[in-house]
Amino acid sequence: MVLANIIVPLIVGAILYAIVAPDVIFVRVLGSFWGNEVTSISQPETAFDYFVRYYLMDILWGYALVFALFLCLGNNAAIGRVFIIAFLFSTAMELLQLTTIVPGVFDIWDIVIEGFAEAFAAFIIIKLFLIRRL
């Protein structure tokens, strides 16, 4: 069950990236493996389009990150520590986008959105996978 909370969001996020954001680096790298040309799509027209294009994949991947850390660190890991590690990693990756180290566009809202997704994943772990542990 923990593994499904990692794999499903990652696959859904990858598919969404390929559909709504083929111009991002992740999709271009995957496309280069298959020899596909990446074409850009039009900019989002509605608030929902904007949310999907710029935040939904971050939510899915932040959620998966917490479950992956929980799985890697073991069921005995304090979920608060797992959340902090995930949040610091996500924040660091976003801040590194201000440099040439990690390509991308820095967005403070990415940090906020990913933090909420990571907190939600931690809450799910507490409710469904932990017994008497915080």
Image (cartoon, rainbow, N blue to C red):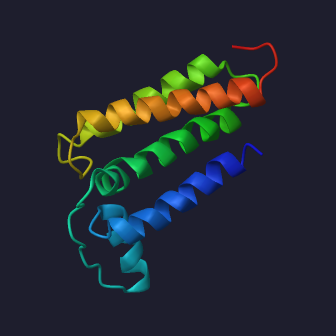
Q: Is residue 41 above or below residue 5?
A: below
At horizontal 34% and vertical 39% (from top left) the residue drawn is: 93
Residue at the far left in the pictured view: 99
Q: Is residue 62 above or below residue 132?
A: below
- For this view, does 125 lie left or right of residue 27? right
User: Is residue 91 visible to us here?
Assistant: no
At horizontal 76% and vertical 22% (from top left) the residue drawn is: 76
Number of numbered labels in the structure image = 0
At horizontal 54% and vertical 25% (from top left) the residue drawn is: 83
Q: Is residue 36 above or below residue 14?
A: below
- For this view, does 119 lie left or right of residue 22? right
Q: Quadrant of residue 109?
A: top left
Q: Position of residue 123 (x, y in %)?
A: 63, 25
At horizontal 67% and vertical 37% (from top left) the residue drawn is: 72
Q: Quadrant of residue 87?
A: top left
Q: Position of residue 56 (x, y in %)?
A: 42, 49
Residue at the far right in the pictured view: 131
User: Is residue 35 visible to us here?
Assistant: yes
Q: Nearer the viewer, residue 27 or 115?
A: 115
Q: Position of residue 81 (x, y in %)?
A: 57, 19
Q: Position of residue 7 (x, y in %)?
A: 64, 55
Q: Is residue 113 above or below residue 119?
A: below
Tell me the quadrant of the picture where the C terminus can be found. top right
Q: Nearer the viewer, residue 59 or 64?
A: 59
Q: Nearer the viewer, residue 124 or 89?
A: 124
- For this view, does 60 lie left or right of residue 102? right
